[in-house]
Amino acid sequence: KAGVTQTPRYLIKTRGQQVTLSCSPISGHRSVSWYQQTPGQGLQFLFEYFSETQRNKGNFPGRFSGRQFSNSRSEMNVSTLELGDSALYLCASSLEGAGAAFFGQGTRLTVV
Amino acid sequence: GIQVEQSPPDLILQEGANSTLRCNFSDSVNNLQWFHQNPWGQLINLFYIPSGTKQNGRLSATTVATERYSLLYISSSQTTDSGVYFCAKSFNDYKLSFGAGTTVTVRA
């Protein structure tokens, strides 16, 4: 059974640009969550989707958005990138959101 | 306030030693998980343990939800056990709150 797949693995973007990250969950998992990890703030929750609906959102500015497709794949978008958005972005999938979460390898975003 | 507190922040072990990592949480849980972050950044799920005790090889975990803590035991540690261990919890909101982690270094 394939694990959670995140693409791309690495990204370098310039301030002011936008970026889209992709996450394909484990087959059969309908919940996808996104987390940001930085040395200063640790692991912080961005948002969670289930059956194409956002059920919870973390305390991030509106520049951070996401969506989920009918096949449970999810994307997150960050517009007008800032230097502080440099981080490891992790995606997790679970069956329905309340059980064990399984993470992808992450996308490391560097904003210059 | 801080929802999840992990201790100790750093742990240095000699290969073969046993250790205990602790996770205290501030309110109710129905989802408590332990993860190991490998050198490439991926979080590996070790245990889903909202209550009770589980064992997987040299690792075991116990959660006492009524007393708001969980413990992760590493026995006969190996150099491959090195990395950061995270505890994370949620309660009816589909959002995991993570602790700051315990960095474990196992020396040969």
Image: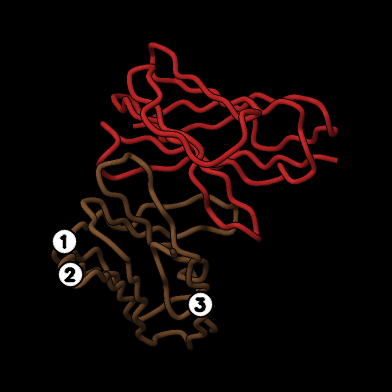
Chain colours: A red, B brown
The chain under label 3 reads B
Disc 1 from disc 3: Cα separation:
23 Å
The three-letter amino acid code for the residue at tag 1 is Ser
Q: Position of residue B11 (x, y in %)?
A: 49, 82
Circle 2 crowding by C-alpha within 10 Å: few under 14, some 14–19, many from 20: some
Label 2–label 1 contact, CB within 8 A: yes
**Sequence-wise, which precedes: disc 2 or disc 1?**
1
Q: Quadrant of residue B71?
A: bottom left
The chain under label 1 reads B
Placement of B57 over or under A87, stated as above or below = below
**Sequence-wise, which precedes: disc 1 or disc 3?**
3
The chain under label 2 reads B
Residue matched to label 3? B9
**What residue is rendered at 39% in x and 62% in y?**
B3
Q: Position of residue A38 (x, y in %)?
A: 64, 53
Residue matched to label 2? B64
Task: Judge by depth and name the residue closer to the eye, A38 or B17.
Answer: A38
Residue matched to label 1? B51
The three-letter amino acid code for the residue at tag 2 is Val
Left or right position of A66 against A83: left
